[in-house]
Image (cartoon, helix red, strand yellow):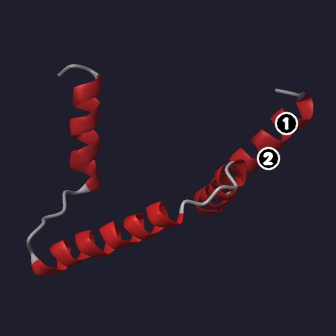
């Protein structure tokens, strides 16, 4: 990483979380200029389907702390 890039990275890391997320998203989006319309539509439809399942009670959510704990346990073989 060049000194200029490292300086920019350090400045970005000092931003508030929400601003860092927006910046990261825009940087990632800039890497791939191709848009698969079918994939975009399928993704949107899946989001709507999942939200409908949550609203109807068919699907239940899991608190983030539990998801994180289970993921860490899987990674560490516990």
Report the residue at 60% width, 60% height from top: 35
Q: Report the residue at 12% width, 66% height from top.
A: 59
Foreground pick, 25 / 44: 44
Left or right: 16, with 53 as reference point: right
Q: Kindly identify the residue that appears in the image at 38 percent across and 66 percent down.
A: 42
47 relative to 4 in the view: left or right: left
Quarter of the image containing the N terminus?
Answer: top right
x%, y% of residue 16? Answer: 64, 58
Pick the residue in front: 35 or 75.
Answer: 35
Q: Where residue 46 sits: x, y (%)? A: 31, 67
Q: In the shown orientation, is residue 14 left or right of residue 60?
A: right
58 in relation to 33, above or below: below
Q: Which mark is residue 5?
A: 1
Residue 52 x %, y %: 21, 78
Q: Nearer the viewer, mark 2 or mark 1?
A: 1
Which secondary structure lies at badge 1?
helix
**Quadrant of residue 15 within the rendered picture:** bottom right
Residue 14 appears in the rendering: no
Residue at x-position 77% and y-position 41%: 9
Q: Quadrant of the C terminus?
A: top left
Above or below: residue 31 compared with residue 59: above
Q: Which residue is mark 2?
A: 11
Report helix, strand or loop for mark 2.
Answer: helix
**Distance between mark 2 and mark 1 Cα atoms:** 10 Å
Instruction: Name the quadrant containing residue 53.
Output: bottom left
Q: Marks 2 and 1: CB-CB under 8 Å? A: no
């Amino acid at each position: 990483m060049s000194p200029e890039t490292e300086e920019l990275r350090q400045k970005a890391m000092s931003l508030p979380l929400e601003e860092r997320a927006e910046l990261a998203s825009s940087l990632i989006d800039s890497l791939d200029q191709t848009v698969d319309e079918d994939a975009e539509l399928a993704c949107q439809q899946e989001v709507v389907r999942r939200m409908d399942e949550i609203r109807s009670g068919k699907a239940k959510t899991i608190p983030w702390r539990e998801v994180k704990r289970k993921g860490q346990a899987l990674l560490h073989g516990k």
